[in-house]
Image: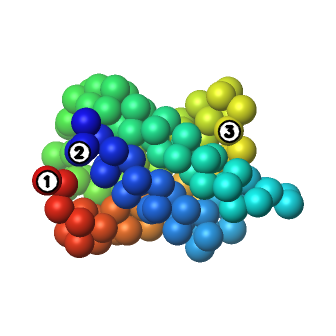
Amino acid sequence: MKGFLIKTLINAAAIWVAAWIVSGIQLAQGKADWQHKALTVLGVAVVFGVVNWLIKPVVKLFSFPLFILTLGLITFVINALMLLLTSWASGKLSLDFHVTNFGSALVGSLIISLVAWGLHLALDDD
């Protein structure tokens, strides 16, 4: 349970950074206070974790030939698609999070991966 909580907080921080840097990713737009933004990003991080836990392995399995063909570069596209799916699911759950297009999702997923990787190095899961 502690590992899930740490991973969710790391994903939340990474999503927040991506929304701050990439103009095509909106997180709690308008006059939302920081508490609303924090709760929104935590909800989005949970959705992102569930999408990556349930759907990403299936997509990776079916796209295995593309992994070989592209030497693993298809991972960037899959991560962007998972971020777009998270945006869609967040909209269905009334979370104020939206990714406007595939380009924003691609850059955002790269930023999320880098920030999450750095935070995982800095914070031990144990």
| Residue 58 vertical placement versus 68 (above, below) | above
Residue tagged by mark 2? 3
Q: Is 101 in front, or is 31?
A: 31
Mark 1 neighbour class, 10 Å CA radius: few under 14, some 14 to 19, many 20 or more: few
Residue at figure coordinates x 85%, y 60% from the top left: 31
Identify the image quadrant of residue 122: bottom left
| Residue 84 vertical placement versus 101 (above, below) | above
**Marks 1 and 3: CB-CB under 8 Å?**
no
**Marks 2 and 1: CB-CB under 8 Å?**
yes
**Alpha carbon separation for disc pair 1 and 3:** 30 Å
**Marks 3 and 2: CB-CB under 8 Å?**
no
Task: Please state which of the two labelled residues, at mark 3 or mark 2, is closer to the viewer.
Answer: 2
Q: Is 41 in front, or is 114?
A: 41
SS for dot 1: loop
Residue at figure coordinates x 71%, y 44% from the top left: 96
Residue tagged by mark 3? 95
Residue at figure coordinates x 55%, y 62% from the top left: 16
Rendering coords of residue 112 (x, y %): 42, 61
